[in-house]
Amino acid sequence: MKKLITTVLLGCAMITAGAQSKDSKMDRFIDELMNKMTIEEKIGQLNLPGSGDIVTGQAKNSDIAGKIKRGQVGGLFNIKGVEKIKDVQRVAVEESRLGIPLIFGMDVIHGYETVFPIPLGLSCSWDMEAIEKSARIAATEASADGICWTFSPMVDISRDPRWGRVSEGNGEDPYLGGQIAKAMVRGYQGTGDKTFTTNNQIMSCVKHYALYGAGEAGRDYNTVDMSHQRMYSEYFYPYQAAVEAGVGSVMASFNEVDGVPATANRWLMTEVLRNQWGFNGFVVTDFTGIAEMVDHGIGDLQTVSARALNAGIDMDMVAEGFLTTIKKSFDEGKVTKAEIDLACRRILEAKYKLGLFSDPYKYCDVSRVKKEVYAPEHRQLARKIAAESFVLLKNDNNLLPLSKKGTIAVVGPLGNTKENMPGTWSVAADFNKATTVVDGLKSVVGNKANVVYAKGSNLTTDPVLEDRATMFDRSLKRDDRTEEELRNEALQIAKNADVIVATLGESSEYSGESSSRSEIGIPDVQQRLLMELLKTGKPVVLVLFTGRPLTLTWENENVPAILNVWFGGTEAAYAIGDVLFGDVNPSGKLTTTFPQNVGQIPLYYNHKNTGRPLAEGKWFEKFRSNYLDVSNDPVYPFGYGLSYSQFDYSDVTLSSTAIDSNGELTASITVTNKGKMDGKEVVQFYIRDIVGSVTRPVKELKGFEKIFLKAGEAKTVTFKITPELLKFYNYDLNYVFELGDFDVMIGGNSRDVKSAKFTLK
Ligand code: NOJ
């Protein structure tokens, strides 16, 4: 075993206070205010009802105005419209005894009215600047409409595409997820002493802490059971990164952790989050998270509410467990005054930091909406970013890009719908403003080509399933005609077309919250349609809509070109045109593995080697870790994505083949654009720690750079390697590096890499 270098102990290593320093002026202000507050009013600050305007859960709150007047509300969420918000704020400020302003939250997940790609899509851009800008614009629009707090970013690592909420996260890699978490927080809040200085910076809420993406069998809200080793090594970093970036709030997850629901888990909420990571904002539950612990089976409402407060929860979303039981628990000695005070103080601090005590109407400038919401410059950027999120999965014989000429037949249930375009969790979007694929393509080709459309099929054979997958006014207007009638109409227009663009896959609510699937292929009737379209012999481009990795084994073998467009937001249709016709060269790379079938799940690139790995080049051997009926390979690996250019990678050059524990070395590679088009490439840098005191993954992403190369151009990309980069959590959960040999791997995806070796001496 290698010699162990313990640099720091976990407890103190992680404290990075960042923006979370002490402010004595704020302390004095809050001390004075709290001196005037009754215990009931303090408990009132911990209550977060839902407005009922936008539905994101089953329960409802009542008599909200009355509660605000009585000082029983700290904030309100998912209410849309600055005029309305201003009115409600007026009630709090003018009609409650102490006039404490409310905080107004919303699920502004990937844009407001200008909608950006779903987070999974956005992550495939690997473009931190673009991601930060998307959050900046979302904050600008939301704040122009009265919102000062967003329940974003969602940073749950997930390796299970059955889970519908993979659409809302950043894929399977903790390092990349951490970089994205930081970019989003910066975009929403600003950084350092520039945080919340303007009225278009809003408070961010990282969620769902913790491990929500690891629910058993991909079923939403399901049990999580995981070793601490895995939590720290593979799942925690994105939450911690958000804390490092100064995130103002954290949302607790629904699932249990170590047998205790996260919402009542003191180790998670206080020991890890606050003591180890140095978080000092406030923690809100998820929707009815407190009341749900009754069903988890850890007590009645009073018990679970007290346990949540004891654990370190500050605000109760919707359940009203705090509001209705904490006073009683206080009287009975089950919670202390100090605990109530602490939670109340944290909420008041958030309001203070946002500037609401200086101006409760800071976010209620009603003149902003018209200029700032859905502004042309926001939409322009959203179009650019959408194109960057698309992943070209296949392009035989350079079928793409298409020429702007002849007749283009758009076929499929997702080709002529506005409602579907913004994607799941776009609660502020005005669906009427989105553009259909057909209209987007028409706008891009102008009068140079003829775009025709036929639906070709419904979303699924099963109308009940289709209903569930098109909730929240997302209906695809199910067609009463038979499968054959619909298909024949499509084949008719296909016959006279030069190329078929098949717009197939999931509808936006086919993934998202409470949209887990046990089969993750393109739905039945659509796949049959695709087969028939291919039989015409015409070139077929599959424009794939999806909120999760799908099993595309058959499609990969049979369809010549596949462009995965996720759900690209309000401007997606134009962006699809930009990429299909080559005005933009695709550069998206997958941040999640696409398995061959459901049985392989969980399938992820940074797995362990096991004691019985397959030999190179083999896909089955008896008594090895494999399946009888399918190889261990994915259809598309993490990091994968094609371009209309081809990028050539040189060998890796190391500045030295050995470093000591104070040293550093560099790994360089030269990338050449061998294609005819200018293009962008995401150069990915992985490391393998070959021998460890605990088993290590076969590779881990440690860096990346997205570069632009003109046709024929070459660039050298260099990554720095220091012992710090080689640290990991050992058996005792100390964050350490160990001496020994390492592989460096650099490439355009996690599978196809060039490698070199060095030693840490
Ligand atoms: C439940 C979801 O899990 C969470 O992500 C969301 O922010 C809340 N509902 C509020 O809508």
Image (tube, helix red, strand yellow):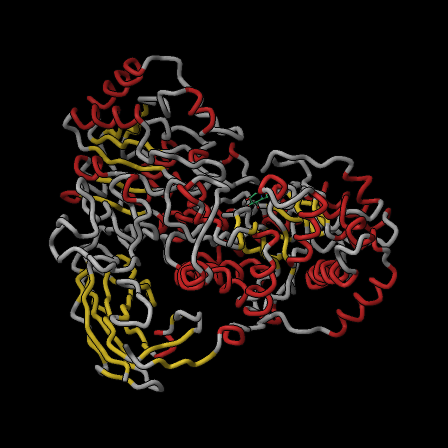
Picture layout, residue 547 above or below residue 104: above
Residue 626: x percent and y percent? Answer: 20, 48
Picture layout, residue 49 above or below residue 33: above
Ligand 1 image position (quadrant): top right
For the point 39% across and 48% down, which residue is it?
121
Residue 463 or 455: which is nearer the viewer? 463
Picture layout, residue 477 above or below residue 388: above
Residue 670 or 34: which is nearer the viewer? 34
Query: Dividing the picture into quarters, in which one does residue 337 lie?
Result: bottom right
Residue 103: x percent and y percent? Answer: 70, 52
For the point 43% across and 71% down, which residue is it?
732
Whether residue 583 is visible, yes or no, is: no
Whether residue 634 is visible, yes or no, is: yes
For the point 57% across and 40% down, which residue is it?
428
Residue 359: x percent and y percent? Answer: 76, 58
Q: Tag count in the figure? A: 0
For the point 16% across and 68% down, which residue is it?
650
Q: Quadrant of the N terminus?
A: bottom left
Drawn side of residue 169 relative to residue 489, left or right: right
Query: Dividing the picture into quarters, in which one does residue 728 lie?
Result: bottom left
Drawn side of residue 454 relative to residue 89, left or right: left
Picture layout, residue 346 above or below residue 591: below
Query: Dividing the picture into quarters, in which one does residue 226 lie?
Result: bottom left
Residue 618: x percent and y percent? Answer: 12, 52
Q: Quadrant of the C terminus?
A: bottom left
